[in-house]
Amino acid sequence: MTQSNNQIAPGRCFLEKVRDRLTDEERQLLLVIDPAKLPQHVAIIMDGNGRWAKQRGYLDRIRGHEAGIDSVRTVVRACGELGLRALTLYAFSVENWKRPQREIDALMNLLKRFLREEINELNENNVRLVASGRLHDLGEDVLAELHQTMQATASNSGLVLNLALSYGGRAEIVDAVRKLVADVLESKIRLDDISEHLLSRYLYHPELGDPDLLIRTSGEMRVSNFLLWQIAYTEFYVTSVLWPDFRRADLYRAILDYQRRERRFGGVTEA
Ligand code: FPP
């Protein structure tokens, strides 16, 4: 995988660039990350916002979502600095529409604010925003902000930040199959052409590839309908840290853990 010229190359020279901003602990962790074995695509199930708010005695779960924005900002920046190719964040699932309307409204408002306020930060860090999910389910106001931020960052060549919004793994497969069947009916492809590779081309953002590492915060051992097709051989990392507490050191720990894994993709290790 070659790094684009605009990306900060991972490794010691990257460390030089961020050193002053890091705590001692972050610096120590970063020093032992192997720049040659970085995951290219990281996906995160950002869980535990409600519990974080409760733990702090807040009566409103929304305080947890608000605090979660700082973690989003930190992780996006850290992934960009490491030179990762893509970061997919599970921001709102198809199932999340079942939450109380007040919480949905608060999440949508937070999302709008994030999209509006983050344009400069994303551009400064060469991050391109894309989104995955049943985006037509989102309100027009959210869609307008989303399109504006995607457009404003479209020419960035560093990290791709993929926000999963109104996203469901099964819904993504159903949507892919619908588009594929439409192409069969229009004779653009033949039944015999259908393969895993071809089906994957119909997913929301096939160009991002499968995640190498899936992180879930708050200790839950569930996939929660996230990237079902893409995680066939993804390495899982679950941390008990709640999402609003998740910081650089936690990301670095997840990456170090990933680097200790042996990925065989169903094969065997050569003697
Ligand atoms: C799960 O925590 C989190 C969500 C459903 C939403 C995640 C949203 C954010 C981090 C903020 C907005 C994001 C962006 C990208 C602007 P939970 O509420 O299920 O927590 P709990 O399991 O402790 O109740």
Image (cartoon, rainbow, N blue to C red):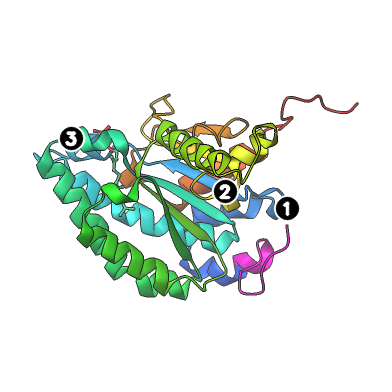
Indicate whether 85 appears above or below 268. Answer: below
Residue for badge 3: 99
Residue for badge 2: 206
Q: Nearer the viewer, mark 3 or mark 2?
A: 2
Q: Residue at x 33, y 70 (%)?
A: 148
Range shown magenta: 1-15
User: Is disc 2 surrounded by few (<14), some (14 to 19) or many (20+) residues within 10 Å?
Assistant: few
Q: Position of residue 61 (x, y in %)?
A: 16, 40
Residue lying at the far right of the rendered structure: 271
Q: Residue at x 54, y 54 (%)?
A: 86
User: Is disc 1 surrounded by few (<14), some (14 to 19) or many (20+) residues within 10 Å?
Assistant: few
Q: Is residue 120 visible?
A: yes
Q: Earlier in the sequence, mark 1 or mark 3?
A: 1
Res. 47 image quadrant = top left
Indicate whether 68 appears above or below 271. Answer: below
Q: How far apart are the two marked residues, 3 and 2, measured between alpha carbons?
A: 30 Å
Q: Residue at x 52, y 74 (%)?
A: 155
Task: Describe residue 176's horizontal placement relative to residue 32 as left or right.
Answer: left
Q: Amino acid at mark 1?
A: Ala
